[in-house]
Amino acid sequence: MGSIDGEQVMDLLGLAQQHHIALSVNGGKLRMEQTVEEDNPNLEIVFRTLARHKDNVMAVMADGDAIRQWLDGKQSQLIALHDEISEGIEKWLQLEAMHFALHPDDRRCVCASGQCRDYALVRCDICANTNKGGD
């Protein structure tokens, strides 16, 4: 992708996809067509944003491997993140078990705030069992 900011162009292509805009090149011009009829107050802004970066968008569209290369790189990043999350969860479970083994009478949440966060990837046994059936 050379001097093109590949991440930015991929974000722009994702923006087009999110707003149901089909992109094509016709005679050196970027064509943008809404594929789903919907009331979208941001559509004009999206069109202008894509038009402002049309040279880079068209360059990526012309490079058959650009998106594949980006996806391959992103997949590698996601695998590394998945591995990091898996290792973190495993360590969480081990240390939570160790905490309760060392302090068997302490039946409070293991988090410093006193309760596992609602959006947590993992919850301690106390919070998980307290919230069973309550949701």
Image (cartoon, rainbow, N blue to C red):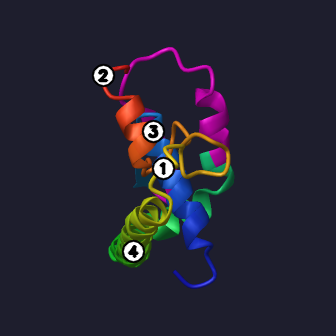
**Which of marks 2 and 1 precedes in the sequence?**
1
Q: Disc 2 marks which amino acid?
A: Gly
Q: CA distance from mark 2 to mark 3?
A: 12 Å
Residue mark closest to the camera, 1 vs 4: 1
**Which of marks 4 and 1 precedes in the sequence?**
4
Instruction: Report the residue marked by disc 3.
Output: 127
Instruction: Report the residue marked by disc 4.
Output: 87
Question: Callout 3: 10 Å neighbours few (<14), some, many (20+)?
Answer: some
Task: Tell me, for residue 133, which label it has, or none.
Answer: 2
* Residue at 38% in and 39% down: 128
- What element does badge 2 sit on? loop
Q: Disc 4 marks which amino acid?
A: Glu
Q: Disc 1 marks which amino acid?
A: Asp
Q: CA distance from mark 3 to mark 1?
A: 16 Å
Q: CA distance from mark 1 to mark 4?
A: 28 Å
Q: CA distance from mark 4 to mark 3?
A: 21 Å
Q: Disc 3 marks which amino acid?
A: Cys
Q: Are marks 4 and 3 in contact (CB under 8 Å)?
A: no
Residue closest to the eye, 95 or 31: 95
Hey, which quadrant is residue 25 in on the image?
Answer: bottom left
Residue closest to the eye, 130 or 74: 130
Give the image location of residue 132, x and y in percent.
Answer: 33, 28
Question: Callout 1: 10 Å neighbours few (<14), some, many (20+)?
Answer: few
* Residue at 35% in and 36% down: 129
